[in-house]
């Protein structure tokens, strides 16, 4: 082991000596800037290498005193690293393990961390050191993270959702007041670069093929997700309906005494959360759990709040298990559930127009998420397509072909989607959208969907694909869908 590696292994506290450490930060998004800002505060020597101009953050780098280098190609980034000769690279989640920068580091023995690994080592800036509740899964991460934080706050704790949800974890860790709990949403990209974190409680909500191009296949994706359970201290929460998550818990190396807690929409065993006679119940965290249960809320109450979908029920039960592990009382959890409003673009009901119900589920960026929406509906005009990320949507089409009234196909990979629909759902009327970007795409899509829909149908934007081919992100895609619908409905009045 080199002297640099020994130093890095020993840097496990905010109060250790980080001064002079040569750190290359790859990426200048919100995460990359938070890393640079933090390390400059610790007196490290920081150079940020990034591929796209960002005038605001570039100015801020100058203000805080970090070096910066715009390098728009892989070769240019490698040249910057050669010139800087970093002792540590902190890399943004968008860089896959097969990226040339990662290979460059491996060849030279340079350590690569993500912001989550760095954050774990710096979690003690204040005396109020937060517990980490870590959440991953193919779908439902953001909603479950928000729900869990909402429940923790209802229980009187200072808590916040951070990480992949949008707020960089390092920004929260530098809060001068500190937190009791940080609810850390983790993507598979982030988990792949985690080495030493020890969550208070953890969950993998579900597992389905996604990001296979990034991880090199299903096994790599699964292994990254499974890392969420490693070194868990108190509660490993898993999905009874998804055996892959149970196996992850069985195989995880956890802290002695950590318990396995299940959730599902069936009647729960002891140490489980589930549903009995239309009531969500907790048999997880009380001494009499073998013979009795705490009632949380009813399915009817969830339906009245517009959050009665099966996948929302699973998210709620998982969040309740995590919050209960940290001592939040059942009555406090019930109050939090019934005051919770999901973010836009997650099975968001847009109302009725032209005799059809319209739903914006733009957050459904993969097959598993689209499946959850489709299985709850019939008479669907499905707006589908985007970047498939190496995933075959044939099983999804086969499963739901009888539910489809029509399909409107968008996105860069629409030829593949069109071929799958023609093969597995030949009876379904299909319209291809030829517009290439933004609002124009959704104007065409909404007009086509309105023409295909019949009285009582549902027009569902649930693309089963990533959005970056035609939109900034899934939220931009959802906003364009809603704006196009508003234009069309206003013009018809």
Image: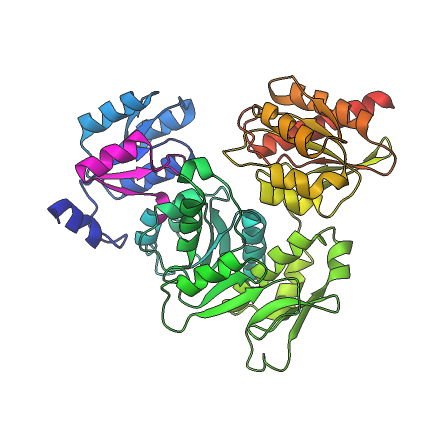
Q: Nearer the viewer, residue 232 or 207?
A: 207
Q: How is the image coloured?
A: rainbow
Residue placed farthest to the top in the image?
Answer: 435
Which residue does the image show at 30% across and 53% down from the upper left?
121
Residue 360 left/right relative to 323: right
Residue 297 left/right relative to 188: right
Q: How many marks?
A: 0
Relative image position of residue 177 (x, y in whole percent)? 42, 55
Q: Is residue 261 above or below residue 118?
A: below
Q: Can the viewer see residue 347?
A: no
Relative image position of residue 446 (x, y in whole percent)? 74, 26
Q: Nearer the viewer, residue 491 or 284?
A: 284
Magenta span includes 416: no
Tell me where residue 348 sits by quadrant. top right
Relative image position of residue 373 (x, y in whole percent)? 68, 44
Position of the C terminus, as image quadrant, is top right
Which residue does the image show at 57% across and 60% down from the upper left?
318
Residue placed farthest to the front in the image?
Answer: 423
Q: Is residue 270 above or below residue 190?
A: below
Magenta span includes 92: yes
Residue 35 left/right relative to 3: right
Which residue does the image show at 54% across and 29% down from the upper left?
387
* Residues rendered magenta in the picture: 88-116
Tell me where residue 395 sits by quadrant. top right
Relative image position of residue 374 (x, y in whole percent)? 70, 43
Q: Nearer the viewer, residue 349 or 470?
A: 470
Q: Can the viewer see residue 395?
A: yes
Tell me where residue 475 sits by quadrant. top right
Q: Is residue 39 above or below residue 199?
A: above
């Amino acid at each position: 082991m080199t002297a640099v590696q020994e130093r890095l292994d020993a840097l496990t506290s905010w109060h250790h000596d980080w001064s002079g450490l040569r750190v290359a930060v790859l990426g200048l998004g919100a995460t990359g800037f938070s890393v640079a800002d933090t390390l400059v505060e610790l007196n490290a020597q920081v150079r940020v290498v990034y591929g796209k101009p960002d005038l605001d953050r570039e100015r801020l780098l100058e203000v805080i005193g970090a070096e910066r280098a715009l390098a728009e190609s892989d070769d240019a980034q490698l040249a910057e690293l050669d010139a800087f000769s970093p002792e540590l690279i902190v890399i943004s989640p968008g860089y896959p393990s097969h990226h040339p920068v990662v290979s460059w580091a491996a060849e030279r023995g340079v350590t690569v961390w993500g912001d989550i690994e760095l954050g774990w080592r710096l979690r003690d800036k204040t005396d109020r050191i937060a517990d980490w509740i870590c959440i991953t899964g193919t779908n439902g991460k953001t909603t479950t993270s928000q729900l869990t934080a909402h429940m923790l706050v209802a229980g009187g704790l200072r808590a916040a959702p951070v990480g992949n949800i949008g707020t960089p974890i390092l920004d929260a860790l530098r809060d001068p007041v500190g937190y009791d709990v940080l609810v850390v949403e983790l993507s598979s990209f982030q988990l792949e670069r985690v080495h030493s974190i020890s969550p208070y409680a953890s969950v993998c909500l579900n597992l389905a093929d996604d990001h296979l191009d990034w991880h090199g296949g299903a096994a790599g994706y699964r292994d990254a997700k499974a890392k969420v359970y490693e070194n868990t201290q108190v509660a490993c929460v898993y999905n009874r309906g998804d055996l892959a998550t149970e196996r992850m818990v069985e195989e995880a190396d956890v802290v002695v005494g950590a318990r396995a807690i299940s959730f599902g929409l069936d009647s729960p065993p002891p140490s489980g959360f589930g549903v009995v006679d239309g009531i969500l119940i907790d048999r997880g965290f009380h001494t009499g759990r073998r013979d009795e249960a705490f009632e949380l809320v009813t399915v009817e109450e969830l339906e009245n709040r517009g959050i009665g979908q099966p996948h929302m029920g699973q998210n709620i039960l998982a969040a309740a298990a995590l919050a209960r592990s940290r001592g939040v009382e059942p009555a406090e959890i019930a109050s939090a559930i019934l005051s919770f409003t999901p973010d836009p673009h997650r099975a968001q009901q847009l109302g009725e127009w032209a005799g059809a119900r319209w739903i914006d589920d733009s957050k459904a960026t993969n097959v598993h998420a689209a499946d959850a929406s489709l299985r709850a509906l019939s008479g669907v005009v499905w707006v589908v397509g985007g970047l498939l990320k190496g995933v075959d949507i044939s099983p999804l089409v086969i499963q739901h072909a009888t539910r489809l009234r029509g399909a409107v196909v968008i996105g860069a990979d629409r030829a593949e989607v069109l071929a799958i629909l023609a093969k597995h759902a030949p009876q379904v009327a299909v319209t291809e959208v030829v517009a290439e970007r933004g609002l124009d795409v959704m104007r065409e899509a909404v007009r086509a969907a309105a023409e295909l829909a019949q009285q009582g149908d549902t027009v569902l934007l649930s693309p089963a694909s990533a959005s970056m081919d035609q939109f900034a992100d899934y939220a931009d895609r959802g906003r364009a869908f809603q704006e196009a619908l508003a234009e069309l409905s206003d013009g018809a009045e």
